Image (tube, grey):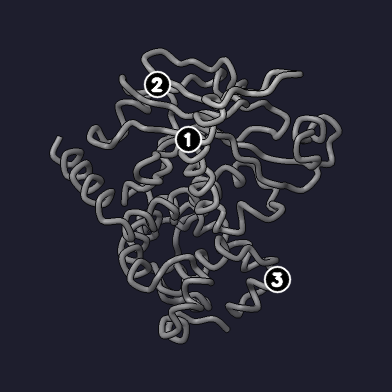
Amino acid sequence: MITYATLKDKPQEFLAATSLTDNEFQRLLPVFRDAYLVGLSTTTTLEGKVRRRKTGAGAKGTLQTMETKLLFILVYEKTYPLQTMQGLHFGLSQPQTNYWIQRLLPVLRAALRQLHVLPEREASTFATQRPQDMPADLLIDGTERRRQRPQDASEQTNHYSGKKKAHMDKNLLLANTQTDWVEYLGPTEPGRRHDKAMADSDPIAYPAGTTLGKDLGFQGYEPSHVVTYQPKKKPKGHALEVGEKFLNRIMSGVRIRVEHVIAGVKRCRIVKDIFRNLKDGLSDLVMEIACGLHNFRISNRHPQPTVKLLDFVIQSNSR
């Protein structure tokens, strides 16, 4: 069985299993505990039934401590094993494992929200909700995630990506070029949708003076009050000029940052491997958590973004 007591003294194994260091785990733990206790009531159960006993009475589960609960859900998000294997690691049956996954994923998202590391989800309020002193140098890109082939014929068509030759879920993502922060995550869409169509259907309210890097998938996407740039496409039957090739190389050097950010998000295998959980809304939930964990790691490992984020949190709490 995997336990926090045995894993915390093995830094490499701890990082590989959770994507966090032990220090980061300890910073997340008290917020996770508070988020977990919010849903508990002294009068009703989680299912809404009237309690016959006090909170905590009855048989004690295997995931007794809060450290074990947080470790359980982080290991699942990072490694994404079969639920049977996840249960074997923690001494649970498959139905018990499924119960705790459904129970703890929203708790983890709530904890990351309290830490102000989740990306913005509302396109219309993006400009007002982001930290005002954070540089507005952004990169936009679409990221696709493999999923199981739907049984419904129309769903198969909607989720099939001709580009990837597989059934996919898809999100738009805005990354900051200077901080590697995921600032905005769009809603989860079927893999068939084009990047520009997704951006047009849910217009993002950018701060004035934003610079936005994009690839050729966003050809014609020109939001107001935003300076955009993208590589020059080679004309059919002609070669690019030397100056155009030089500018393309410069833009590629900047745009690689968004690929690095997406790779950081997909450090969680649950958004990299074929997604098997078919419950409505779960694909979007795990992607949001993966982005939040990426931002949480960035805020702990890069001093400059952390200072700006803490200033924003203080200003938000004082208003």
Could you tell me residue 147's position as x and y percent? 72, 47
Could you tell me residue 264's position as x and y percent? 50, 53
Disc 1 versus disc 3: distance between alpha carbons?
48 Å
* Residue 244 vertical placement versus 271 (above, below): above
| Residue 48 visible in this rendered orientation of the protein | no
**Front residue (pair 225, 161):** 225
The circle on residue 250 is 1
| Residue 128 visible in this rendered orientation of the protein | yes
> Which residue corresponds to the image point at 65% horizontal and 78% vertical from the top-left?
88
The residue singled out by tag 2 in the image is: 205
Could you tell me residue 99's position as x and y percent? 60, 62
Q: Residue furthest front?
A: 242
Please tell me whether mark 3 or mark 2 is closer to you in this view. Answer: 2
Looking at the picture, which amino acid does disc 3 mark?
Thr
Q: Residue furthest left?
A: 318
The tag earlier along the polypeptide, 1 or 2, is: 2
Q: How many other residues sit within 10 Å of disc 2, few (<14), some (14-19) or many (≥20)? A: some
**Front residue (pair 226, 173):** 226
Looking at the picture, which amino acid does disc 1 mark?
Ile
Quadrant for the N terminus, please: bottom right
- Is disc 1 placed on a helix, strand or loop? helix
Disc 1 versus disc 2: distance between alpha carbons?
27 Å
> Which residue corresponds to the image point at 55% horizontal and 52% vertical from the top-left?
263
The tag earlier along the polypeptide, 1 or 3, is: 3
- Is disc 3 placed on a helix, strand or loop? helix
> Which residue corresponds to the image point at 56% horizontal and 53% vertical from the top-left?
266
> Which residue corresponds to the image point at 52% horizontal and 28% vertical from the top-left?
214
The residue singled out by tag 3 in the image is: 84
Could you tell me residue 211's position as x and y percent? 38, 26
* Residue 224 vertical placement versus 70 (above, below): above
